[in-house]
Amino acid sequence: MRMLFLVASSLAAACSADDAGAPGQGIAAPKPAGGCPVIDSRDWTAWVDAQPGPDAPTLHIRGTVDLPTPGYDYAWRLGVADRALPPGQHMHLDFTAPDGIVTQVVTTMDVAYQDKAAFDAYRMILVRCGGEVLAEISDVPTAH
């Protein structure tokens, strides 16, 4: 019985060492459950459309993210705005992983937000995912 325990312990240690990957081997550790699945992001822009209309002003945010598999869905959540004038707005990007078995290939996805703006102008937009900051967009023009 004791020998079985030692063999099982050795196998568990070997598997966990292999799963972690050694530095420099190009093997990334998996992201924690509930964390942000985004591998990389880029091309973030934000602007306020202040043209007259029923939903004026409108906040627009766009960016590109790389995800570990195809099939992810995303949703935006409005976060807090700071008390500066003009304010900085926190936006949360939530991802839902696909169900079932999917190809393990890095997939690029464009993400966009458009909704009524709480303010006429913004100093910056902070895009968050899980506990990570994906982007700080500091140039937020207003189109009149």
Image: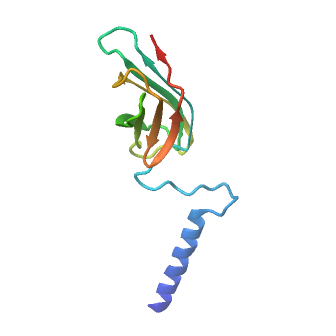
Q: Position of residue 109 (x, y in %)?
A: 51, 32
Q: Residue at x 43, y 38 (%)?
A: 72
Considering only vertical position in the picture, is 33 above or below 38? below
Considering only vertical position in the picture, is 140 above or below 14? above
Q: Residue at x 52, y 44 (%)?
A: 68
Observer-nearest of 142 and 19: 142
Observer-nearest of 106 and 122: 122
- Quarter the C terminus occupies: top left
Residue at the right extreme of this rendering: 24
- Viewer can see residue 37: no
Q: Position of residue 112 (x, y in %)?
A: 45, 27
Considering only vertical position in the picture, is 60 above or below 13? above
Residue 29 location, quadrant: bottom right
Residue 80 location, quadrant: top left
Observer-nearest of 4 and 70: 70
Q: Residue at x 36, y 23 (%)?
A: 117
- Quarter the N terminus occupies: bottom left
Considering only vertical position in the picture, is 19 above or below 134? below
Q: Residue at x 34, y 15 (%)?
A: 56
Residue at the bottom extreme of this rendering: 2
Q: How many marks?
A: 0
- Viewer can see residue 52: yes
In the picture, measured across the screen, residue 40 lies left or right of residue 33, that is: right
Q: Position of residue 67 (x, y in %)?
A: 52, 41
Q: Position of residue 20 (x, y in %)?
A: 57, 63
Residue at the left extreme of this rendering: 54
Observer-nearest of 139 and 55: 139
| Colour mapping used in the image | rainbow
